[in-house]
Image (tube, grey):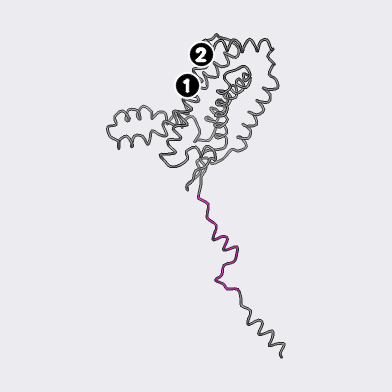
Amino acid sequence: MNKSCLVYNTLSTASPPSASAPSSAQAQTQTQTPRPATRRVVDATTRMLHWLMALSFTAAYITADGERWRLVHVTLGYTLAGLVVARLLWGVFGPRQVRMSVLWRKLQGLPAWLKSLAAVRSPSALQATWRPGQNLLMALAVALILALVVPLTLSGYAVWVEWGGEWLEEVHEFFGNTLLFVVLAHVGLIALLSVLRRKNQALPMLTGRVQGPGPNLAQRNHGWLAAAVLACVLAFWTWQWNTAPELPAGDAARWSENHHDDDDD
């Protein structure tokens, strides 16, 4: 009898878990901050082509002078030309949002925008005209970059095989400086829009995504194709370096001396 009472008292005094007290898993779930919604606007292949072109041009411009980096400069020039061809093909057969037809439709609004800009007479009208012109100027910069690469690489190849004289080198240098100016204007416009819109406008070209609800503009990421593009570029660089003929010491010294004389003139 005493044993039964003891068991009963023990069970009755044990407090059952409160239904209102959340478990540790529930508490952890409640304290977690939900991630903001994002959507994909740029696929991986477009981003890979963009940054490889930026890297190739920047490095080619830095290595433009001096015999020591001549092979690197030429290799990067070939790479830039190939990447532009790949981007044009991607603009024909790729997703709708990166096609050249979309870029062309944006550029068709340039004459009307310039006409409206010339008719501005007040700050409010300028602000209203500037907003649609932001994306238009971005499209114009992209089109100029793609177009300038063609004469830049062709003149560079002509200089490499020595088809012309000093005038051809000056032509090549002119297109290189012009492309640099357009690239810097493109970067400056992105920085300006980032300040005006209070949002990093370069981030989508890095991550491919923007914050906010809505459908993905880029339905597929095409990550495998981006990896293939990178692999092809690295393979070309390796092949170009391993198969490049070594310039005899006398020819190298003569080339370097001639270019130093040209710089002095």
In the rendered image, residue 223, in percent from the top left (x then y), is placed at: 60, 38
Residue range in magenta is 17-36
Q: Earlier in the sequence, mark 1 or mark 2?
A: 2
Horizontal and vertical percent position of residue 120: 29, 31
x and y percentages locating residue 191 in the rendered image: 45, 35
Q: Where residue 68 sits in the image (x, y, percent)? A: 63, 19
Secondary structure state at the residue bearing disc 2: helix
Q: Which residue is drawn at 42% across and 34% down?
A: 135
Q: What residue type is labelled 1?
A: Thr
> Where the N terminus falls, by quadrant?
bottom right
Q: Farthest bottom residue?
A: 1
At 60% from the left edge and 35% from the top edge, which residue is drawn?
A: 226
Point out the residue furthest to the top here.
165
Residue 26 lies in the magenta stretch: yes
Give the main secondary structure, helix, strand or loop, of the magenta stretch.
loop
Residue type, numbered disc 2? Glu
**In the image, 157: left or right of 6?**
left
98 and 27: which one is in front? 27
**Residue displayed at 57% across by 10% down:** 163
Relative to 96, residue 162 above or below: above
Q: What element carries label 1?
A: helix
- Which residue has dot 1 on it? 178
- Residue 50 tag number: none
Query: In the displayed structure, would residue 195 be above or below residue 13?
Result: above
Q: Is residue 182 magenta?
A: no
Q: Distance between the residues labelled 1 and 2?
A: 12 Å
> How many neighbours does mark 1 have within 10 angstroms: few (below 14), some (14-19), or many (20 or more)?
some
Badge 2 density bin: few <14, some 14–19, many ≥20, Cα 10 Å: few
Residue displayed at 47% across by 47% down: 212
Q: Name the residue under label 2.
A: 170
* Closer-to-camera residue (240/262): 262
